[in-house]
Image (cartoon, rainbow, N blue to C red):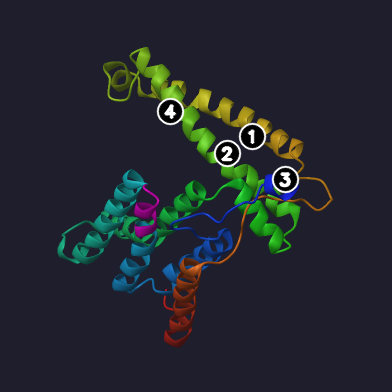
Amino acid sequence: MEDIKDYVFKPQRPRGFYLDPRTKLIFMACLSISLVVFGKDILMLVLLATIPFCLLLINKQFKIALIYGGLFAFGVFAAYAHNTWTLGSVLNAIVILSVALVVKIFPTFMFGYYIIDSTSVRDFVAAMKKWKVSDKFIIPVSVLFRFLPTIKEESEAIKKAMKMRGLQFGSFYSLRHPMLYIEYRVIPLLISIAKIGEELSAAALTRGLGVDVKRTSIAVIGFSTYDYILGLISLSLIIYGVLRGVSF
């Protein structure tokens, strides 16, 4: 007679490149702080931006990587070249502020997009449970992980529906009535956001995220070689920032 253990589901660790959700959150914090600490060191900012850019490429998010990477590269170029331009005081201040925001914020955006796209709700909940994190934090963030991709799909559906009616961006109607175009684009999206938020919150509670009993999970959570490498990079950034001193 066959052993019943042969029929028991045994989850396996993800193959290929995989980062633990806890590693992503730790590096996200280190990256955000480092972008402020090394605010005047352009070379260091470029090195910091290279990490999320490479992670996006590994995760096959080529379009987002090229968009964010291109804007960041333009910001770095403008930071080097703005002293050679002859601009008015107001316009020069706007350019400097815009460049500073792009250079210091876009690497965080790149890594945040990577986290949302590469982390499943199951893995995130299992990782946070290992850290003994309160459900008051886990439930809202778990809903957020599903909320943003759903909003993206809804926005694409609204865009296609408007295109079928000849209301796509750049058309004669949108150029002649820009405020009406924005209204037709934004109002349905806002209504969808309110509805989707309620549905996802109800779905999370239906799946038992709000219960007080201990939950089980088939997610295999653990640190791999890639986690240790990224952890070592985070530790190096902290040590280097402390030794160098904070400069805004």
- Helix, strand or loop at label 1? It is helix
The residue that disc 1 covers is 197
| Mark closest to the chain's N terminus, 2 or 3 | 3
| Mark closest to the chain's N terminus, 3 or 1 | 3
**Residue ID at (31%, 47%):** 67
Do the numbered discs 1 and 2 sit on residues whose CB atoms are within 8 Å?
yes
Can you name the residue that lies furthest to the bottom here?
Answer: 243
Could you give the CA–CA distance between mark 1 and mark 2, rounded to whole angstroms? 7 Å
| Mark closest to the chain's N terminus, 1 or 4 | 4
Q: Is residue 224 above or below residue 160?
A: below
Identified by mark 2, the residue type is Phe
The answer to which image quadrant residue 47 occupies is bottom left
Front tag of 2 and 3? 3
The residue that disc 2 covers is 147
- Helix, strand or loop at label 4? It is helix
The residue that disc 4 covers is 156
Disc number for residue 118: none
**Residue ID at (41%, 58%):** 105
**Does the magenta segment cover residue 55?**
yes
Identified by mark 4, the residue type is Glu
